[in-house]
Amino acid sequence: MEEKTEIGIRSERIAPDEYIDFLKRTDLGSQYPRERFEERIERLLKNASVSLTARDGENRLRGVLLGLTDFAYWLYVTDLGVDRAYLRRGIGTRLMKEALALAGGDRDIAVYLIANDDAVPFYEKLGMRKAEDVMQYNHVDWTAFRVE
């Protein structure tokens, strides 16, 4: 078992190549379509209004949260992932708490996201519940693949 290392959370922009390498070590690597993948990842990283990282003592990327917010009412989390070797250490919880605080706090900000089935128990532990009032418009070409 890998020894535990101190993980620091900070707000920062991530380079596309570093993020793509990170995706290979998480379950997020299967959430994107193949179509124009690298071009779209670059836009995501450039335009996310919340971009948080979790790094170990050697500055290696161990967790990421990306989101969109108006800093007044809502936060939409597009990506929340933790390196598989660092799961169950509280990193995802810390990233969510920091993102909510950054967006404006839990008394003002509603959080939305799309969770894969395996992640639902994690989000439920954070106090989130499934919503039935979300609308969708999706005409995107979507060829499933896994970043490897």
Image (spheres, rainbow, N blue to C red):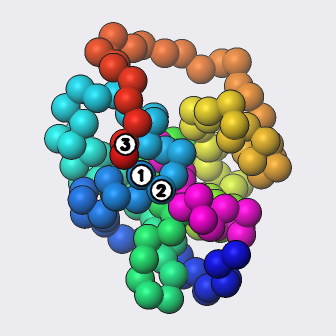
Mark 1 to mark 2: distance in Å? 5 Å
Q: Residue 105 appears at what percent x and percent y?
A: 64, 60
Quarter holding residue 140: top left
Q: Which residue is mark 3?
A: 147
Residue 136 position (above or below residue 89)? above
Q: What's the CA distance linking mark 3 and mark 1?
A: 6 Å
Could you tell me the amino acid type at mark 1? Leu
**Residue at the image point whose x is 70% and y is 75% from the top:** 1
Toward the viewer: 67 or 40?
40
> What label sits on residue 121 in the rendered view?
none
Q: Which residue is mark 2?
A: 25
Extreme residue in the front direction = 1
The reply to whether dot 3 and dot 1 touch (C-beta < 8 Å) is: yes
Relative image position of residue 11 (x, y in whole percent): 42, 71
Name which quarter of the figure residue 132 lies in.
top right
Instruction: Identify residue type, mark 2.
Output: Arg
Q: Which residue is the site of mark 1? A: 23
Q: CA distance from mark 3 to mark 2?
A: 9 Å
Above-or-below relation of 109 to 142:
below
Instruction: State which region is magenta.
Output: 78-91
- At which x and y percent is residue 63? 52, 64
Mark 2, secondary structure of its residue: loop
